[in-house]
Image (spheres, coloured by chain):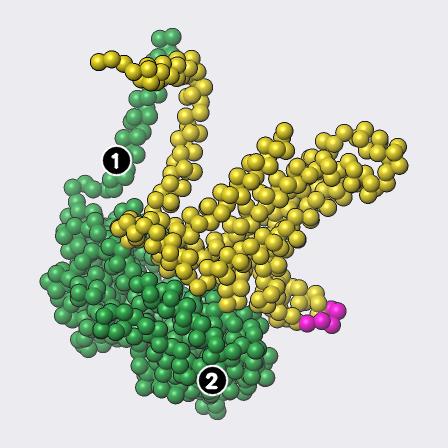
Amino acid sequence: MKKTAGQGAEKKNAGKFFESFKANFSGWMLIVPSLILFILIVWRPIVIGISYSFFELRGVTPAEFVGLENFRQVLADTNFIKTLLNTVKYVFWSLIIGFPMPFIAALMLNEMVNCKGYFKVAMYLPVVIPGMATCLIWKMIYMDGGGGFLNMLLYFFGIGPLNWLSNANLTIPLIVIMMSWHGFGTTLIMYLATMQSINQELYEAARLDGAGFWGRIRHVLIPHMSGTMLLLGIRQIISVFQVTEQPLVMTDGGPNGASTTLGLTGYNYAFRYGQYDKAMALGVISFLILLVLTFIYFYLDKKTQN
Amino acid sequence: MKNLINKKTGAVALSAIMACAALAGCGGKDNGKLSVAIGNWPDPANEASYAAAQENETNFEKLYPDVDIVPDSYSFDSKTFNVKASGNQLPNMFNTHYTDVQQIIKAGYALDITDKMTERGYAQAMSPDLLELVSDENGRIYGIPMQSGAYAQGLYINKELFRQAGLENADGSFKIPATYEELAETAKIIKDKTGKAGFVMGTSSNCGGWYFMNIAWSYGVQFMEQDSDGKWTATFDTQEMYDALQLVYDMKWKYNVLPDNTVIDQAEQLKLYATNQAAMMISSPPQDSLVSKYGMNKDNAHVVSIPAGPKGKFSQMGGTVVMASTNTTEEQLDVIFDWLDFKGQGPEFTETAESTLRSSLEAKREANNIILPCSAFKVWVNDDRTEKENALYAEYTNVQASDYDKYFAFDGVQIKAEEPVCAQELYSVLDGVIQEIITNKDADIPALVKTAANDFQLNHLNNL
């Protein structure tokens, strides 16, 4: 049989690959464990989750291919839009409350001369508290009635007691405040590292040109920080979009669904109603939304690095 | 070099030996015996119950020398069950609740035990109503209702708060509310006199809807009906439902007798009651955690009949059901029935069964768990059998019988099983309505019910 040009090229490529594989055998062996773990822990669940979302499941075993039926049911759920909007509200409030907080704190730390180490540790401490414990602590702070810590505090000023988590308009911002308190330490350290990497001569040059504190921030700091801020902003959006355990522990999505998110709805489908197929479909919908955000993140990351 | 090769060979050989040893360990302690894994085995931390279970294992294996009982601590949890079942990791015998039986049958994770139930005389001796709850639509049986753990909901009274509110009669009895209206008024007296919540009811984690069923049924609410084509329709957008929810609304906004905290799951409800922060709650006795977890004196709890609504008294029932995993063989299934007979959970209350139950009650008493004087409802149609068992409970009870008399009298109480389909989904929808009512003074009850019925129909019943 006559060989085609394509087959020849393929064989040549395969040969090249094996030569390279043989030459870098030790290197390949070093990454094999990570690769296996990566496939098992990251890719396998994603692929299984996506494929199962097209099936009717009995328990967690596929029983019948149903095409897009699970997606139809999830999207036709009368609470879907409300839940999606709630999730967007979390993101919105996290950008208002949680985004500037670490930047301002990093700026203060950067300008500090004394006790910098102490404040750095103190501000990072909430990060090391387990998430569930943080939720429970803040649940006690926000508790309605005279027993809540916030209400006790207000009592001294003759105010209240007020309703906090049970107030449908306040629930999401209050949960976001707790999330920001818990997570802002990590972002702060990243901001601080970027701030400290700015060449001090630029500040001095700006000072010589007559720039004051705000001038130095506007003309030196912000231009240097904008890339990092953009990336951390996108990362925050991606992470807040997946919020689940905080409303689960603090409000169970209430009052009357006012703090329910896509993640919590997925949790309810799977673990409250045993509808794993719908949970998978909702997971895929969230995955697609996050995929778009992730592409934006990588695009901006590349642009920033360039 | 040779040394290195020897070391490598040695390491490989050692790994192989360890792997073989590990695999051998996975097989369990077979020894030519028939292994049967029994779930819900007590935790070693619970010393008395664990010791009693170990003793049962030894005695059973003496009676059946060819059988090896393999203790499995897996206790049913809806969050882990499906994953465990799909991985074939369930013990041969596992426990579940009435609430989850139909979902397990539908998922195909339980064995059809109809023939064995008949062969062993269980099916004939058991209450037909209960058998229906553990069977599929074709009448095939998949579960065995347990006499121990059977419950119906009642009204818990906190004696301490009742005394403080002056609601104790001269003879030491208490002024018990007979209707829900009276419950609200009694709660108001307690709130005024003690400052504590007169009544607590769950509002989250599906607990609000679950407890509310008792109230709704007593107001005459029919939640759903099935037409001749098998289609289910939500039928609770009615005046009866508005009236039942109005009671909850009034307890918050008219009488102000509910706790300040509005996100209350079952644990929080029990805590508030046990720690004298709330005077009354609807729950199902016995509740061991009141004593073991929250330090309540068990003589401070008094359980009475559930209050009446305009259409009577309704109490939701529940309890434990035993099922067999699908990988259980015919021989293993026989051992499961032998085990249940031995433990006093079978139709015949033999001497062995009595002796096993006796030691289990002793362990419960030692662990300071609550032992009631009898069971809430009868699993067996044979009254003699139930009476024999109840006599044993009465001997070991560690609560004052007078504290439970009115509950066990079930005077005019209709014991009702959960709604037939989408019960958890219904509770979740009702949770939302209850939360709105107790957090929003301007809540429009008819509008909320209309939305809830529509949501329940479109999101759940239509997808069946």
Q: Quadrant of residue A143?
A: bottom right
Dominant secondary structure of the magenta stretch?
loop
> Whole-Å distance between the Cαs marked 2 and 1?
62 Å
Q: Can residue B352 be seen at all in this image of the molecule?
A: no
Image-quadrant location for residue A278: bottom left
What color was chain A assigned in the picture?
yellow
Question: What secondary structure is found at the residue carrying circle 1?
Answer: helix
The tag on residue B183 is 2
Quarter of the picture containing the N terminus of chain B is top left
Mark 2 residue crowding within 10 angstroms, few (<14) / some (14–19) / many (20+): many
Judged left or right of residue B292, residue B72 is left
Q: Amino acid at mark 1?
A: Ala
Judged from this view, the residue extending furthest toward the left is B119
Report the residue marked by disc 1: B24
Q: Colour of chain B?
A: green
Quarter of the image for the C terminus of chain B: give it: bottom left
Q: Amino acid at mark 2?
A: Leu
Q: Residue at x 15, y 67 (%)?
A: B123
In the displayed orientation, state which residue is furthest to the bottom. Answer: B170
Left or right: where B75 falls relative to B289: left
Q: Which span of residues is magenta-colored? A: A156-160
In the rendering, at what x and y percent does residue B105 appear?
25, 59
